[in-house]
């Protein structure tokens, strides 16, 4: 299992457009991805799951990856977050 924490920098937080692009990056990969903010953790199976966290600018979210592609996908998601959120 691999994981990383990320502090949201975008003034709009995690909103529909980047959540959709992030879902496209994760969809179909041999990996289970979960996202947590505080006590709430959701499996990243769709856009609404991550948006339900209500992550705003300055909030910390934790991404967890489990599966054959965990390390590679973690690196891709981390790069996406740094470039977009």
Image (cartoon, rainbow, N blue to C red):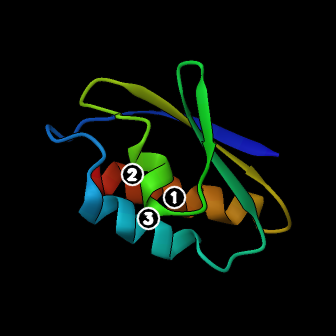
Please tell me which residue is depicted at 30% across the width and 56% down the height of the picture: 83
Residue 22, position as x, y percentages in the image: 43, 64
Please tell me which residue is depicted at 68% across the width and 65% down the height of the picture: 72
Kindly indicate the quadrant of the structure image that contains residue 60: top left
Foreground: disc 3 or disc 1: 3
Residue 19, position as x, y percentages in the image: 37, 59
Give the answer, above or below, for where 38 lies relative to 68.
above
Tag 1 or tag 3, which sits nearer the N-term? 3
On the image, numbered disc 3 is attached to which residue?
A: 22
Residue 81: which numbered mark, if any? 2
Give the answer, above or below, for where 22 lies relative to 35.
below
Horizontal side, residue 10 vs residue 29: left or right: left
Secondary structure of the residue carrying tag 2 is: helix
Structural distance between the alpha carbons of marks 2 and 3: 8 Å
Residue 26, position as x, y percentages in the image: 58, 69
Asked if the residues shown at circle 2 and circle 3 are in contact, with their CB atoms under 8 angstroms apart, the answer is yes
Asked if the residues shown at circle 3 and circle 1 are in contact, with their CB atoms under 8 angstroms apart, the answer is yes
Residue 77: which numbered mark, if any? 1
Asked if the residues shown at circle 1 and circle 2 are in contact, with their CB atoms under 8 angstroms apart, the answer is yes
């Amino acid at each position: 299992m691999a994981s990383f924490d990320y502090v949201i920098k975008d003034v709009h937080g995690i909103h529909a457009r980047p959540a959709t692009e992030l879902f496209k990056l994760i969809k179909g990969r041999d990996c289970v991805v979960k996202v947590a903010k505080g006590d709430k953790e959701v499996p990243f199976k769709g856009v609404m799951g991550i948006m339900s966290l209500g992550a705003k600018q300055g909030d910390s979210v934790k991404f967890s990856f489990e599966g054959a592609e965990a390390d590679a996908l973690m690196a891709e998601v981390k790069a996406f977050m740094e470039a977009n959120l």
